[in-house]
Image (spheres, helix red, strand yellow):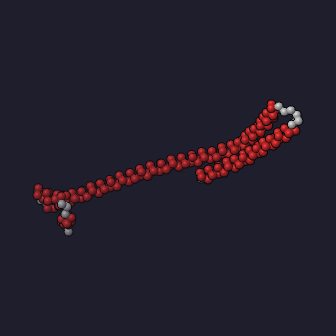
């Protein structure tokens, strides 16, 4: 059950209870009208007798207190009926809240794991690129040393020329030619 459905159900239940309370209040108003008509009929009967203001006020107070007491007990009964439903809805809401918080905690953990994985992947890729570059540098150094051994020409001009071919102005054709010369092809 979604939050909106629960809220709608709660409002429907409250609406029904309010309608019941409204009916009870209408009954109370009806009882009040009956009490009023009874007072009027009693007053008409007692026209011949002398009526004091105190007796009328006392009669009014008794009828009003009876109406209030009956309304109060009816409202209390309705409230007692509504409270378990509200407590049930509250416990359901608390359960849903706990589930949502658990879900958020799991999402946070998943996001942390994804970020850590991405960082480790990036470090791994960068390390592989470093190793590839270092491996290429070692291959170039190997070719240079083998060429120098093969030609048996170790002087400053030869080393300078190799440095220019391999590092300064990399010449792939010259490097390929040196590889063939070293391998004896």
Quarter of the picture containing the C terminus is bottom left
Q: Position of residue 60 (x, y in %)?
A: 79, 36
40 with respect to 91 (left or right): right
178 over 64 or under it: above or below: below
Along the viewing direction, whichever of 107 and 36 lies nearer the viewer? 36
* Labels in figure, total: 0
Residue at far bottom of view: 185
141 with respect to 31 (left or right): left
Along the viewing direction, whichever of 115 and 8 lies nearer the viewer? 8
Along the viewing direction, whichever of 128 and 63 lies nearer the viewer? 63
Q: Residue at x 80, y 41 (%)?
A: 36
Q: Residue at x 31, y 56 (%)?
A: 129
The image quarter containing residue 161 is bottom left
59 over 89 or under it: above or below: above
Q: Position of residue 25 (x, y in %)?
A: 74, 44
Q: Position of residue 112 (x, y in %)?
A: 44, 49
52 over 171 or under it: above or below: above
44 over 99 or under it: above or below: above
Q: Residue at x 16, y 59 (%)?
A: 164
Whether residue 58 is visible? no
17 with respect to 31 (left or right): left
Whether residue 27 is visible? yes
Q: Residue at x 76, y 44 (%)?
A: 29
Q: Position of residue 7 (x, y in %)?
A: 62, 50
């Amino acid at each position: 059950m979604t939050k909106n459905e629960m809220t709608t159900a709660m409002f429907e239940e409250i609406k029904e209870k309010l309608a019941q309370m409204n009916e009870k209040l209408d009954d109370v108003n009806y009882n009040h009208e009956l009490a009023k008509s009874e007072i009027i009929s009693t007053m008409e009967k007692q026209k011949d007798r002398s009526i004091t203001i105190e007796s009328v006020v006392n009669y009014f107070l008794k009828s009003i207190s009876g109406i209030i007491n009956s309304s109060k007990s009816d409202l209390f009964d309705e409230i007692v009926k509504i409270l378990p439903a509200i407590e049930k809805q509250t416990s359901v809401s608390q359960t849903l809240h706990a589930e949502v918080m658990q879900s958020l905690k799991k999402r946070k953990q998943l996001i942390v794991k994804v970020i850590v994985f991405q960082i480790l992947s990036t470090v791994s890729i960068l390390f592989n690129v470093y190793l590839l570059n270092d491996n290429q540098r070692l291959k170039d150094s190997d070719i240079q040393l083998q060429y120098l051994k093969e030609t048996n020409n170790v002087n400053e001009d030869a080393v300078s020329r190799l440095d220019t071919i391999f590092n300064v102005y990399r010449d792939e054709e010259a490097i390929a030619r040196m590889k063939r010369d070293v391998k004896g092809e």
